[in-house]
């Protein structure tokens, strides 16, 4: 009886963390143009505040992702494993490009890494849905 309860906790935490990581990036990307007229520091301040929430969510995503892997029965076919490797790659890319976005100092680098981080985060969501299906 306890197993379904833990499955619910695991999946709920994973989805909540994905909502913060991916959804937050999309919301922030939409807000940046609106915030710029109030000063160059305003979008940076909003991004810093988001990062205080986003990085712990990313850590929860990774931990619950590992928990999800442990919960899978090992009898998955080659297609499942291929999608899983692709998802792991885009999750790593999302975290790396988000980190590079934070470290970027030019507008071009900010745009490039921000776009890559968002695109890879969305790709991870799609691949996660594919794995769950």
Image: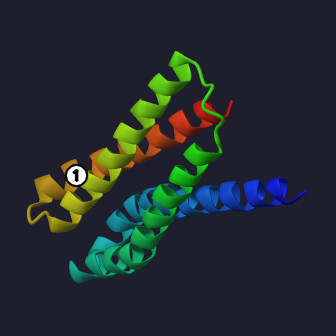
Residue closest to the far left: 106
Q: Which residue is mark 1?
A: 113
Which percent across, then down, holds residue 98?
29, 58
| Neighbour tally class for label 1: few under 14, some 14-19, many 20 plus, Cα within 10 Å | many
Q: Quadrant of residue 106?
A: bottom left
Q: Secondary structure at mark 1?
A: helix
Quarter occupied by the C terminus: top right
The image shows residue 9, relative to residue 123, as above or below, that is below
Q: From the viewer's perspective, is 120 left or right of 26?
A: left
Point 39% across, 69% down: residue:
55
The image shows residue 14, relative to residue 86, as above or below, that is below
The image shows residue 117, relative to residue 39, as above or below, that is above
Q: Is residue 27 visible?
A: no
Point 60% across, 30% down: residue:
130
The image shows residue 79, relative to residue 119, as above or below, that is above
Residue closest to the far front: 74
Which percent across, then down, holds residue 21?
47, 60
Q: From the viewer's perspective, is 28 left or right of 74?
A: left
Q: Is residue 93 visible?
A: yes
Residue closest to the far top: 78
Which percent across, then down, holds residue 63?
50, 60
Quarter occupied by the N terminus: bottom right
Q: Nearer the viewer, residue 114 or 37?
A: 114
How many numbered discs, if any? 1
Q: Quadrant of residue 109?
A: bottom left
Q: Nearer the viewer, residue 26 or 13?
A: 13
Which percent across, then down, holds residue 4?
83, 53
């Amino acid at each position: 009886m306890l197993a379904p309860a833990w499955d619910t906790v695991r999946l709920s935490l994973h989805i909540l963390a994905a909502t913060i990581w991916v959804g937050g990036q999309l919301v922030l990307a939409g807000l940046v143009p609106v915030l710029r007229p109030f000063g160059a520091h305003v979008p940076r301040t909003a991004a810093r505040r988001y990062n205080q929430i986003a990085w712990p969510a990313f850590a929860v995503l990774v931990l619950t992702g590992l928990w999800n892997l442990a919960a899978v029965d090992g009898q998955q076919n080659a297609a499942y494993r291929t999608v899983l490797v692709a998802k792991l790659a885009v999750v790593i890319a999302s975290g790396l490009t988000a980190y590079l976005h934070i470290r970027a100092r030019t507008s071009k680098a900010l745009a490039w890494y921000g776009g890559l981080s968002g695109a890879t985060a969305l790709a991870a969501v799609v691949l996660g849905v594919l794995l769950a299906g």
